[in-house]
Amino acid sequence: MALGISQNQRDAELLARFSKGDRAAALALTSRLAPVVFAQAFRMLGDRAEAEDVTQESLLRLWKAAPGWDATRAKITTWLYRVTSNLCIDCLRKSNRNSGDEVPEVADETPGIDLKLQATARAQALQHALQTLPDRQRQAMILRHIEDLSNPEISDIMEISVEAVESLVSRGKRALASTLAPQKKALGLEDD
């Protein structure tokens, strides 16, 4: 692949090669996109097994779409974020859970390192707090502040206006701040 080609162009090229039977292209695209899809799904669902299932289904849908893919209509990553978000929302609706009571522990096996323990506690607190948000707020917050996407990209993924994205993110920030406020000192987020 030539220098100066965007990641989106490389992805589209790999997808086109896959649709013609190139297994190496499928492996290359999967190794790049699967971790991104899994991270998004895990943050939305809070469950590793469900996130793995959503990742697999998202990539299967990409492979099915490959023969008719039109690279001028959408970026592969934007399309995948949308598919993943929709699958996660479906999964949440089916399980009818919004409380986030069971958040898997992200344990750091390194004993005695206070900063790593504090970072783990912060990550767990954030994951739990994210699970308390309504689905659309959680989705917008994850895409904006964890996946670091722009509001217009999120607008495309969620199929809502940029203003609606801004509103969801703003309400999500306020809700997270309120949820995390009682824990600020314990998480080392409060100045002495």
Image (spheres, rainbow, N blue to C red):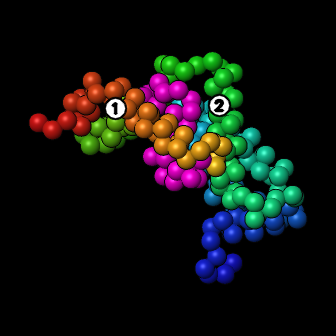
User: Can you say which quadrant of the picture contains the C terminus?
Assistant: top left
Task: Give, as a three-letter code, the residue at label 2.
Answer: Ile
Residue drawn at (68%, 37%) of the image: 86
* Residue ID for mark 1: 177
- On-image quarter of the N terminus: bottom right
Checking the image for residue 89, the label placed there is: 2
Left or right of 19 in this view: 46: left
**Classed neighbour count for the residue bearing mark 1: other residues with Cα under 10 Å, few (<14), some (14–19), many (≥20):** few
**Which is nearer the eye, 130 or 29?**
130
Magenta span covers which residues? Answer: 127-155
The x and y percentages for residue 95 are: 65, 20
- Residue 181 at x, y percent in the picture: 28, 28
Residue drawn at the location 52% of the way across and 50% of the way down: 151
Looking at the picture, how far across and down is residue 177, in whole percent? 34, 32
Closer to us: 77 or 164: 164
The secondary structure making up most of the magenta span is: helix
